[in-house]
Image: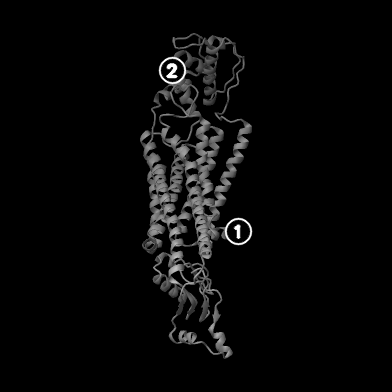
Amino acid sequence: MLGLDYTYSSMDHLVDLSILSGMKMEFPDTDVGLLNFVKFLSMARDEANSSSVVLEPIVQVPILPSEYQTEDIVILSILATAMMILVIVGNMLVIIAIATESNLTNIQNWFIASLAFADLSLGLVIMPFSLAQELLGYWTFGSFWCSMHAALDVLLCTASIMNLCLISLDRYWSITCAIDYLNTRTKPRVFMMIVVVWGISAFISIPPLLGWKQSPDLSWFHTIHSQKEAMNASTTEFGMYLANEMSLEEFDNFTKVLEDVVFPKCQVSDEVGYVMYSALGSFYIPSCIMVFVYIKIYWAARDRVRKNCKVGKEDEQLKGKPKRVLIGGSSATGARKLNRMHCKENNVDNMNCNGWQGSSASNSKDNLVDTNDDNSISTSSGYQQTCGADIIKPRNIFNKLRLGRRLSKDAREIIDTGRPKIIWEPAAVTDDNGVASIEKEKKRIARQKERRATLILGLIMGSFIACWLPFFILYLVGPLCPICAPGFEGSCCVDGWVFSVAFWLGYSNSALNPVIYTVFNKDFRQAFKKILIK
């Protein structure tokens, strides 16, 4: 054993270690024991500097670096576990619905499926290990999985944000370049768009694995640490020796590095160049694109609603309306032909003539249909269109044939030619009150649509920015303002709990995405009910 005296060899020391010679201190001969002892010496020094109070014979030093008490750990575990369940269940429902429901397998939902896969993987692979590190205060799963975990964390978070950006671009192109874009939005092209998104995400996440990170030189630490075995000293003796031989700054540096070795942290590379590169690519550039695109979508949607309202008014006042519409052949085919004819005559945007909604065409042969007053076309098959004539009571011509009844001239002409016939009548003249009432109703509906569009776009952008912006602000300033630590002497630092809140707030966006992007869609709601009730 070493015979150590308790005097200082450096004027930097401010504590007389001789006061420790009579204390009962038991620290195991491990790195954890050495860490706790040198931290105890630092506490003794700080205590002696602040007052003349004599230290207690036995001082309790925390064994683990967790900043949370037992009650805090229980509460945080419940909250984080509930979030992970929402992420996993919600995104899994989205993927199952798109994969199993025929009315949800359209191409545009592939983007939502890609988003759900990224968020689901984040909840399954990343969040449980991040929660363990948050509660324990250190990473206990090895250096290899730390590197993979950090890379996958960046990959999946970036892919989630990039998919949100891709969804916004898809909606924007569908509105502003509808005919051209929808004709070119084929399965191979959509698949390639999704592959490009994941490729960009990988390009951002892989560089730290290839060496783009800070690797401090710790050779001096390992040289000093190896002296403990060479000296055959106990933990307390070696700690006293370090306190005697080192300056105050050297002792604090040794303590900090020893703590990082004993209780390592798994973090994304904090190299300044990579921080700038990943922050711009993962968040700032995609978010700027999303803000610009959704503003354009809002204005385009508002203009379309107002244009349709204006076109409806002019059509009703100037063009007149069909009194009777006779459709021959397949009801759906005839209705489509009639709709295109009517839209062409009334100079209505082609996009509004393609928005057929409803079930598939029925198998009925020939239908005689009348019109009502809101200038939209519908058939017995359930198809409906806003710029044609609304069909209310279809009557089957073949019923008259079976009963031997005489057909009208118009009905016979339909059977002979197989083409629809339209009999037009001038627009009915209404008083000012009637016209004002119709216009008031149309404006009310237009305002409702604008409010709904504003609400949906506000939820999309509001949740995205609220969840991710705090984290990426702290991430970007991290090299200049690191997380506060004991003994930190810089001019700027961030409290650990502030960074933790921002960190987990970003993860929460993966729980909100399946709600925001599906809850306003009736087909998704019905598919969720069908899956959960089974």
- Closer to us: mark 2 or mark 1? 1
Structural crowding at the residue carrying mark 1, measured as other residues with C-alpha within 10 Å and reported as few (<14), some (14–19) or many (≥20): few
Q: Is residue 140 visible?
A: no
- The residue that disc 1 covers is 529
The mark tally for this picture is 2
Colouring scheme, one of rainbow, by chain, secondary structure, one colour: one colour
Q: Position of residue 301 (x, y in %)?
A: 44, 56
Q: Nearer the viewer, residue 314 or 262?
A: 314
Quarter holding the C terminus is bottom right
Measured in 3D between alpha carbons, the distance from the residue under mark 2 to the one under mark 1, in whole angstroms, is 64 Å
Question: Answer yes or no: do the residues labelled 2 and 1 have beta carbons within 8 Å?
Answer: no
* Disc assigned to residue 267: none
Question: Where is 443 relative to 425, above or below?
Answer: above
- The residue that disc 2 covers is 249
Q: Residue at x 49, y 32 (%)?
A: 264
Q: Is residue 200 visible?
A: yes
Mark 2 falls on what kind of element?
A: helix
Name of the residue lying farthest toward the front: 431
Q: Position of residue 472 (x, y in %)?
A: 44, 38
Q: Nearer the viewer, residue 157 or 441?
A: 441
Q: Position of residue 439 (x, y in %)?
A: 50, 61
Question: Where is 146 relative to 359, above or below?
Answer: above
Q: Amino acid at mark 1?
A: Lys
Q: Nearer the viewer, residue 45 or 519?
A: 519
Q: Amino acid at mark 2?
A: Glu
Question: Where is 48 relative to 491, above or below?
Answer: above
Residue 37 falls in which quadrant of the image? top right
Residue 152 falls in which quadrant of the image? top left
Nearest to N terminus: mark 2 or mark 1 = 2
Q: Position of residue 456 (x, y in %)?
A: 50, 51
